[in-house]
Amino acid sequence: MNKWALVFFLALAASGPKMHFDNRKHNFGQQQRYADVEHKFLFSNHGDAPLVIKSHETSCHCTSAHYGMEPVMPGENGWVTVRYDATKVGVFYRKVTLHTNAGTVVLAIKGEILADHSKVDPVTGD
């Protein structure tokens, strides 16, 4: 490959949307059972083309992700809210995989759900 073809290839690879998170992980620490366990991950588009989140996958049905459906323009910010269903007591670690036109990004959440002894589950008695 000659040097001009290499320069063209590198310039082409450098263009397009670029999804940038300051942090892709969130630790909820200890939370009470049935607490509202959600975190908003903020990102920015550091590229030169609109950024689109095409789809997502979660590592468990107990985790959900919500995000804006509109393209995030270059230099602008977007968000992904990840929610964990805090009904099961114990330590958790879950992932959300985002499929975008800038590639695949993995977000992670972790924490521990504590039993709330002041409440009784009517089904299980816990």
Image (tube, grey):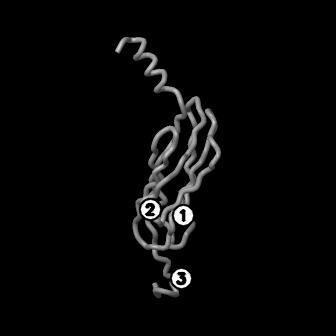
In the image, taking residue 32 as reference, residue 2 lies left or right, namely left
The answer to whether residue 36 is above or below residue 115 is: above
Q: Are marks 1 and 2 in contact (CB under 8 Å)?
A: yes
Look at label 3 and name its amino acid. Lys
Q: Is residue 66 above or below residue 126?
A: above
Label 1 CA crowd tier, 10 Å (few <14, some 14–19, many 20+): some
Rendered position, 73 above or below 54: above
Tell me how many marks there are: 3
Residue at 58% over, 29% down: 48
Q: Earlier in the sequence, mark 1 or mark 3?
A: 1
- Dot 3 corresponds to which residue? 119
Identify residue type, mark 2. Gly
Question: Residue 91: x, y in percent?
Answer: 40, 66
Outermost residue on the left side: it is 1
Alpha-carbon span between mark 3 and mark 2:
21 Å
Quick check: 126 above or below 110? below
Viewer-proximal residue, 73 or 34?
Answer: 73
SS label for mark 2: strand
Instruction: From the top left corner, tell me how far across and down residue 13 is, in percent.
Output: 46, 26
Q: Which mark is residue 114?
A: none
Q: Which residue is mark 1?
A: 37
